Amino acid sequence: MCCERGRHRHKSGCRCGGVQTGRFLQPCLLLLLHRHTTHGYELMQSLGTFGFTDSEIDPGTVYRHLRKLEEEGLVNSNWDTKKGGPAKRLYELTAEGEVFLHSWAVNIESDIQRLKEFLTKYHAQFTFEERR
């Protein structure tokens, strides 16, 4: 994208498309929790496997999403006091969260199809030089 490369061709900020990082955190967190129950810090470390950079993984944002997922009944959390040191929140996926995760996957597959169709049409209309 032009913003990622610092080559804006428009003056009023970036109007290019792209995945909304914050919103995409939700299915990633749910998928990580499907693997196993864990703490927020471990979740943040694992988000890199989805292509998130360290600058995109803001702890405040991650914890806000976890609270929202919990409010919606998709995630449960409890204080883990079994290990030494300060208590930490332990997050787990609920049955409703698993259903929601599956619906995210269906929507993502649909979006991929739409994006592929767009790119096919885009590449048919523009030469490589025009796209640069």
Image (spheres, rainbow, N blue to C red):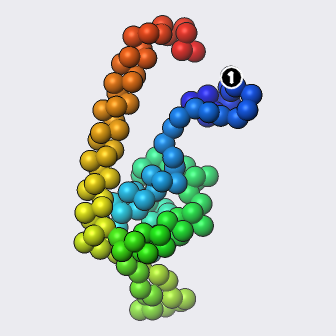
The location of residue 21, given as percent across then percent down, is 52, 49
Q: Relative to the observer, which residue lies in front, 58 or 19?
A: 19
Identity of the residue drawn at 48% across and 54% down: 23
Is residue 86 found left or right of 77 in the rendered image?
right
The reply to whether residue 40 is in sight is: no
Is residue 22 found left or right of 15 in the rendered image?
left
Q: Relative to the observer, which residue lies in front, 86 or 56?
A: 56
The secondary structure type at the circle numbered 1 is: loop
Quarter holding the N terminus is: top right
Identity of the residue drawn at 70% across and 25% down: 10
Residue marked by disc 1: 9
The location of residue 118, given as percent across then percent down, is 39, 24
Q: Relative to the observer, which residue lies in front, 128 or 125?
A: 125
Identity of the residue drawn at 39% across and 57% down: 28
**Residue 83 in which image quadrant:** bottom left
Q: Examine the rendered structure and indicate whether residue 51 appears above or below residue 33.
A: above
- Mark 1: amino acid: Arg
Is residue 94 found left or right of 45 in the rendered image?
left
